[in-house]
Structures are given as C-alpha cells and as structure tokens.
Image (spheres, rainbow, N blue to C red):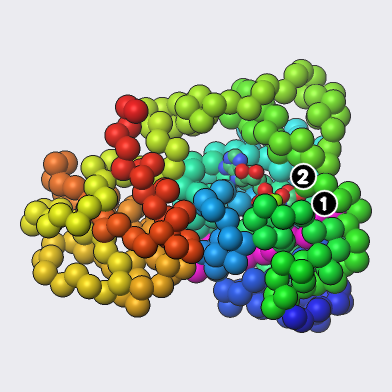
C-alpha cells in the first residue's frame, strides 16, 4: 500500500495515477472515497470489480465546483439554489445528464441521470482542482462493509490501493442525496446535511423517493427499463444471428457472423467486458438499420463482474412495457 501526503507534489502524483486509469482513495469530509477517472470505462469497471459490488449501482461524480458540475449535469433553478447554499459540502444532487456528458455510462449505471458532489475537504478540493476531470468515487470499503472514515479503514478493504492520508473525516457520514427532477425535489438518502436544513432553503418539503417507474417516466418518457435499453430487441441467447442482426460476444470464440459484431473481451476478461458493455449496446443500437434487426448477446459467465453484467442485460432485454 502507498500512503500519500496532502502536499501539492503528492496530490499531483495522485491525479496522475487517476489520469492513467488507476484508482486512488482520498479523504472527503464525509468518508474516504475510492476514486476513478469517471470518463474512463476501464477505470470505472476496475472500481466495480475491486469493490465487489453485486450490481452496477450508479456512482457519485466528484467535481471541484458548480461550473464543473454544470458541464456534466443539468442543474435547474432548485438544484442551483441548493448547490449555491451547500456546496462545497456533504450534499449530492442527482440531476439529468447533460447531452455529450463525457462521464462513462457505466459510472451512471446507464441511467439518464448523474449524481454530483462538490466535497468541502480541502485535500479533496485540491485533488479535484489538479484533475480537471470528474472523479467517480463510492465509499472506499468492500461492498456491504462499514464506510471508512480513516485511512487505516481503507487499507483493511484494499491493502494495495494508494491512499491519500487526510486523517479522520470531519462528518463521518455519507452525503445526503437529493434528486432534482423537473420541479420536484426528492429526498434520496439521509446523510451529512439534515433534511430540515435543506427544506429551510427551498421553502418546502422534500418528496419521498420516487419509484423507478416514476423517476424514469419523468426523465425519459416511454422508457421504463431501469437501465439503458436499446431500441432494438435485445436477446440473450446462443442462437445464430440473421445477416441483419448484431452480435455481441465474449471470449473470442465467434467468427462466423459476417454482420455487425463486437467481442466484449476476446481474452475473456469480465472487467474489460463490463467496461465495454454499455458502449457496445449503444454502438450496435445506432448501427443497426432495419427496425426488425435484433442485438443478440451471448450469455456471459456469472462470476466476478459477470453477475452484474447479466443482471443489467436481463433488465435491458425485458420488453419496455413490463
Ligand atoms: O459522502 C459520500 O457521498 C461518499 C463520498 C466518497 O463522497 N460517497 C458515497 O458513495 O457514499 P456510494 O457509492 O457509497 O453511494 C452512492 C449513492 C448510492 O446510494 C447510489 O445509489 C446513489 O448514490 N446514486 C448515484 N447515482 C445515482 C443516480 N443517478 N440516481 C439515484 N441515485 C444515485
Ligand atoms: Mg457506500
């Protein structure tokens, strides 16, 4: 394990590690985060693999200030009011993704929304200022374990990860999460800022969490599957593709299909497959010309990230009206 200090040279080194696609744990005022360059699908997939998350839960993107947040998400008047009042600080805002948002789809679990946070911890601030790119970071603990509020806690879960030592976290509780969709504000997670303090600023009550269905029908009308579902039919199967169909395979085995074809990982690496999954679905969906053409994807082994990949694929393969 490498421990870095909080001096500018150490933070420049941490930013460089992130820039080349590796992970760095860093202090925030809430808990330690396990950071990855949010634009880099391989880095984000590595993060999911390391945390052992059973599903691709969407990640919070950490940025230096409101301007940086507005480059990747659409903050309406209510979101801007909250940001102006509570940022930097332990408040995360979930807002629609901006068109051409450079954050990788896997970081947002394929959702049309993005979670944004501007941490107050000066070391986190300095790191994000060095990076100039959004840093996706869940709490730096193995999935299902206690969130780390000290660098030593991070090392228990991840002995090989570089940690910036910022001592104990001041708040010690994850950020509160508010969803800002159209003119409604939803209380998505209780955390470092009290609900009543937020309600005092907006002058009204926060709504209870919307159902997935409600959330998506507002954000992306007519599209109820939870995660990115292609417009073409997606079939998880070993069947032979028709000439017009697109094939997504894994492990380098398929050679016969002469139409559209992507192998998620010719070497059979599930982390690489996870990194390429959403982009492959998106690319195939755009490339298919006939509306009847299908995207056929081979079932992947369900170990490691394969479990999360198959969970997402099953959701995406469910017809939209179910
Ligand atoms: O204080 C914190 O927020 C810490 C530090 C490191 O910043 N981070 C943290 O991340 O707690 P994590 O991954 O443990 O929790 C992220 C939460 C999850 O509950 C996730 O479902 C939610 O944020 N989330 C992220 N993107 C979302 C989205 N688009 N819609 C709804 N919820 C989202
Ligand atoms: Mg967590």
Residue 311 visible, this angle: yes
Looking at the rendering, the stretch of residues picked out in magenta corresponds to 29-42
Please give the count of numbered marks on the rendered protein.
2
Q: Which residue is mark 1?
A: 30
Residue 38 within the magenta-colored segment of the rendering:
yes
The x, y position of residue 305, in whole percent, is: 47, 61
Is label 2 within 8 A of ligand 1 (CB to nearest ligand atom)?
yes
* Residue 137 quadrant: bottom right
Contact flag, marks 1 and 2 (Cβ < 8 Å): yes
Q: Is mark 1 within 8 Å of ligand 1?
A: yes
Who's the residue at 15% across and 54% down the image?
239
Q: In this figure, which residue is indicated by the disc labeled 2? A: 175
Give the quarter of the figure containing the C terminus.
top left
Residue 277 in picture, x, y percent from top left: 39, 59
Q: Is residue 242 above or below residue 203?
A: below
Dot 2 surroundings within 10 Å: few (below 14), some, or many (20 or more)?
many
User: x, y percentage for residue 136?
Assistant: 63, 58
């Amino acid at each position: 394990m490498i421990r870095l200090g909080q001096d500018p040279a150490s933070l420049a080194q941490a930013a460089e590690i992130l820039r080349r696609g590796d992970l760095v744990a860093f202090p925030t005022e809430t808990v330690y985060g396990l950071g990855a360059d949010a634009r880099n699908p391989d880095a984000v997939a590595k993060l999911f693999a390391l945390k052992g998350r059973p599903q691709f839960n969407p990640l919070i993107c950490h940025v230096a200030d409101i301007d940086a947040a507005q480059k990747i998400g659409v903050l309406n008047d209510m979101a801007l009011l909250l940001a102006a009042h509570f940022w930097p600080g332990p408040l995360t805002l979930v807002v629609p993704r901006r068109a051409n948002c450079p954050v990788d789809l896997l970081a947002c679990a394929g959702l049309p929304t993005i979670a944004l946070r501007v941490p107050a911890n000066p070391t986190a601030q300095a790191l994000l200022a060095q990076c100039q790119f959004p840093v996706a970071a869940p709490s730096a603990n193995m999935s299902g374990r206690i969130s780390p509020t000290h660098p030593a806690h991070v090392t228990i879960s991840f002995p090989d990860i570089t940690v910036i030592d910022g001592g104990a976290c001041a708040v010690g509780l994850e950020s509160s999460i508010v969803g800002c969709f159209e003119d409604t504000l939803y209380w998505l997670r209780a955390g470092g800022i009290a609900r009543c303090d937020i309600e005092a600023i907006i002058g009204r009550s926060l709504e209870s969490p919307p159902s997935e269905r409600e959330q998506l029908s507002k954000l992306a009308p007519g599209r109820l599957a939870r995660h990115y579902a292609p417009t073409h039919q997606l079939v998880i199967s070993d069947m032979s593709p028709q000439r017009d169909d697109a094939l997504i395979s894994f492990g380098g085995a398929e050679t016969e299909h002469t139409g559209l074809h992507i192998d998620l990982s010719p070497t059979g690496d599930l982390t690489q497959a996870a990194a390429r999954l959403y982009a492959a679905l998106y690319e195939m969906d755009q490339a298919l010309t006939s509306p009847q053409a299908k995207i056929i994807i081979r079932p992947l082994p369900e170990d490691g990230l394969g479990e999360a990949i198959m969970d997402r694929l099953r959701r995406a393969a469910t017809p939209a009206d179910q």
